[in-house]
Amino acid sequence: MVHEILERTTVKPIEELKPAYGTVVVKRGFARMQKGGVIMDVTNVEQAQTAEEAGAVAVMVLDKLPADVRKAGGVARTCAVKIIEEVMDHVTIPVLAKCRIGHYMEARVLEAIGVDMIDESEVLTPADEHHHINKREFKVPFVNGARNLGEALRRIAEGASMIRTKGEAGTGNVAEAVRHVKEVMGRIRMLKTMNEEQLLDVARELRVPFELVKETALLGRLPVVNFAAGGIATPADAALMMHLGCDGVFVGSGIFKSEDPLERAKAIVLATTFWDDPETVAEACRMVAEKKSMPGLDIKSLKPEELMQVRGQ
Amino acid sequence: MKSLPEVLVGVLGLQGAVSEHVDALNRALSELGLKGRVLTVKNPEQLERVRGLIIPGGESTTIGRLSARGLASKIREKASQGMRILGTCAGMILLAKEVYDARIGRVNQPTLSLMDMEVVRNFFGRQRESFEVPLTLPILGRELFPGVFIRAPIVEKVWGEAEPLATYNGKIVAVQQGRLLATSFHPELTEDLRLHKYFIKLILDTL
């Protein structure tokens, strides 16, 4: 198990010419190909095509955008298979979909229909209050949300090929995503100064394998691709998350809950790529109007039971 | 040992597996005992002094659209002046003159249109059909090369000066056309630096 975690880019000498599917290299490699890009939430073919035209690296198909999940309440489940398949038939970029935390069969269904990556997501209502899916059993890669280093490393130990911040989905408020990425990065910065004895303490505290903690300390970053998600609504939000060291961004409600989705999608892609060039970020900001941004929610106005980020720790 | 000039190699840094190629190039340069610098290229001016460019894996539609802001024409101009290019996966798609998608058919996406080949995107299927397999790549010697294929394209046919370098299951997965190289697979996700070294030698004309 531990060896598999460390096996990032090593391809062993192979005696026979048989292809190996669903390996760690192939699953984590898929996430690497998404780096520097924007993954957009969509609910139908038309939105998916808009996202592709705007330069999204992938689309995430949902039944409802997170802002509507929040409004609707009740139990949020995985998206209708028919809609996901329709989207797969109409775009060339990868298609992702969400399953409920711990819901093996929703995940198996998504794998069976050929979804390129599964998001085991706190935006949907968790199916298992105590366990996440053992993602090593799957051929398709998974992405999981995390608020801190412990959550991130526990998900990686379970086989996640990619991590994203949880943020607070459907709020149009980037503050929680900022908090979460700083939690993760700040803790990794501390690991880098520690000796093995201290790293062992951290492994015990976070309830993760020591080798994973050691690898993270050595790399000075998570051993898998790490995106931002949860509350990103504007080009400047996306650039901010890149500036904080994220490998790319997910935009949920921010695009298709705005009044200028195509222009906004293009602008967010531009700002994500050229985040380190303020003039180009300004050009991206010029493409959108603040009046047309999705309405935002102050996290402090949410009741504790309305927070999605506390699901699945 | 003959002293070689310092070499400046670029990696197109718009999107995708950029840092992996930068790392691989740095290690390849150091193992070859060469002085060199690797530059992440995001705008046309940065391309000016670069003698070779790697177009990495990523999403070809995204990289294509972002490079339409001036980089694509600069790459084409530099290519005509002799700049070496290696395209991996999405990079292969961007170098091709003809592009199809296995499921959608003819696709209208911006490409550089530099190599005489017809590429089929997502040929093997979706991510669950992504795989690793050892390949025979004669230009790199007898030892098999680790092929990592991720939603990979293949080359349906080549013409003109383009020549197949490797095949898998009868499909072309690596092509060279003079100073231009393209692979369906991802050498940057492996520990094998032979292809990056080959590309550096192609830049220095020391093959």
Image: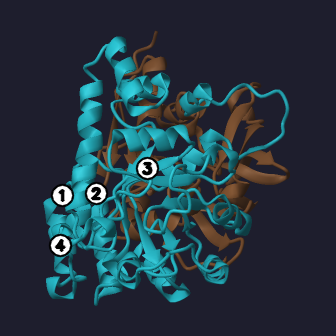
What is the three-letter code of the residue carrying label 2? Asn
Query: Looking at this rendering, what residue extends furthest in the top direction?
Result: B1
* Residue situated in front as seen by the camera: B96 or A306: A306
> Image height check: is B182 above or below A285?
above
**Image quadrant for the N terminus of chain A?**
top right
Specify which label sits upstream in the sequence, 4 or 1: 1
Residue A301, disc: 4
* Shade representing chain B: brown
Foreground disc of the pair 3, 1: 3
Residue B181 placement (x, y as % from top left): 59, 47
> Image height check: is B8 above or below A111?
above
Q: Chain of mark 3?
A: A
Q: Can you tell which quarter of the image residue B113 is in?
A: bottom right
Residue A266, disc: none
Label 2 sits on residue: B43
Foreground disc of the pair 2, 4: 4
What is the three-letter code of the residue carrying label 1? Asp
Label 1 sits on residue: A277
- Real-space CA distance between mark 3 and mark 1, rounded to the nearest whole angstrom: 26 Å
Residue A237 placement (x, y as % from top left): 22, 65
Residue B138 makes an appearance in the image: yes
Q: Chain of mark 4?
A: A
